[in-house]
Every structure is written in C-alpha cells, then in structure tokens.
Image: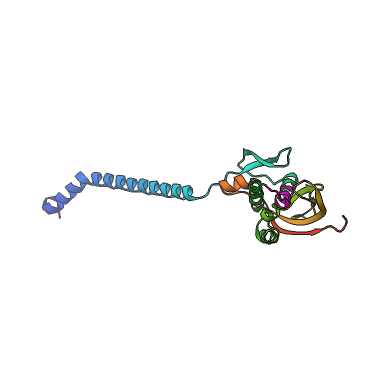
Amino acid sequence: MSKSQESPYLRAKEEWFERYGNYIKSRNQWRNFALGLLAIIFLSMGINIIQATQNKVVPYVVEVDKLGHSVAVKRADRVEPISARIIQAEIANLIVNWRTVTADIGLQKKMVQKMSSFVVGAARGATRSWYEANNPYERGQKVLVEVDIKGIPLPVSSESWRIEWLETVRNHSGVALSSTKYEATLKVRISPPTTDSQIIRNPAGVYISELSWAKLLEQ
C-alpha cells in the first residue's frame, strides 16, 4: 500500500508520536529522577533517625592523681588498655569505702554508694550480705573503723588481685579497741562506661565481679 493509500488515522498517529514522543520521554526521565531522589532522601532520613536513637559512648583517658583517685583527663576516640596503677588504685579505694565505719552518716552513705558502683555479680551479693551482718550505720553509733591498706594490690593471675589491709576499731574517744589484718582476692572485669552516669561514677570501667576475704593468722 502506497503512502497515498495509507489510513488517515495511521498518519495522524505517526504525526502525534513525532510531535509529542520526545515530550513524553523527557517527562518520564524527570519523573524517574524525582522518584530516585525521593528514595535517597527517605533512606538518609531513616539512617539519621536510627543513629539518633542509638547510645553514643564518649570514651575517656583516665589517670590516677596523687591521692590515688581516678580522674577523667580528656576524651578519646579509642580507649586504651587500663593500666595496672588504675586497677590497683580502684581496688584500694573499694576496700576503704567498703570497710570504713564513720559516725558521719552522710559520709558513710557516700562511701557505700561509691563502693556499690564498683561491684557486680557475685561480688555485689557478697558485699550486700556483709552489710546485712555488719550494718555500718548501726556500728557507727558505737565504734569507728579505720582502714589502712598494707602495700599495693598484687596480681595473682591475669584477672585476679590480692590485697591486705589493717582494720583498727576505736571508740568515739579515739581509743583503739582492736586491730585485725585481712586479705582479699578480687576478680577484676574491665567494662568501659556507656552512659553519662557510669562515666561519673566509674570512669575507668573497673569492676569487681568476685570477692573473697579472710582474717590473717599472723597478727
């Protein structure tokens, strides 16, 4: 069939495609581009929401001051291994806060709270049982207990440490009533802080997970 015999409908269709086909193609390309851009925006918003809801940990480099207390001196992107000096200082502080008895109720409460920030697991149960049998608030009404650490804590394994101390019981006039030497073996667990409250209470992340103690025979 020659062009002169072609249907006028076919000619009109061809003319329409030639005139509007490029417009339709261009429109489809822009529509696909817009849909792709929207998908990227929604994906980015989803990722931002997930990141915002996750806990963000700010690690600190911790050093020991002249008094043996740990202090956070600067922020760090990576937490380096805790030094033996820090572990030794924290163990000594725990023993002092745990076994000291004072007539100052406010100070006694702070010492108990500090000690509880460093014990977990079996050690928490052991110290709780000791407090139930030796209530420091009741004892403080009758006697005072002074704790003197004898030497720095020494490692007995990769996780356990040994410490000795002397407990002197005095009356409220300051007269010594008795002196007893003790030793304890403590298992240490390092767990970097993940919340602001943990950073404040235990910046080094040194925790005691197991604790056993006994009187020394040589007095």
Residue shown at 36% from the left, 45% from the top = 37
As drawn, is 143 to the left or to the right of 7?
Answer: right
Q: Eyeballing the image, is 37 above or below 125?
A: above
- Residue visible at 13% across and 53% down? 9
Q: Residue at x 80, y 55 (%)?
A: 182
Residue 169 x, y percent position in the rendering: 78, 51
Q: Is residue 85 magenta?
A: no
The span shown in magenta is 91-103
Looking at the image, the residue that sits furthest to the front is: 173
Which of the 4 quarters of the picture holds residue 157? bottom right
Q: Is residue 6 visible?
A: no
Q: Quadrant of the N terminus?
A: bottom left
Q: Is residue 20 left or right of residue 75?
A: left
Query: Between residues 125 and 65, which one lies in front from this camera angle?
Result: 125
Q: Position of residue 48 (x, y in %)?
A: 45, 47
Q: Nearer the viewer, residue 150 or 6?
A: 150
Q: Is residue 181 visible?
A: yes
| Foreground pick, 148 / 142 | 142
Q: Residue placed farthest to the right in the image?
A: 218
Q: What is the x, y in percent for residue 104?
A: 67, 46
Task: Provide residue 8's location: percent of width, then percent of height.
Answer: 11, 52
Q: What residue is drawn where x is 56% and y is 48%?
A: 195
Dominant secondary-structure state across the stretch colored magenta: helix
Say which quarter of the image contains residue 131.
bottom right
Image quadrant where one finds the C terminus: bottom right
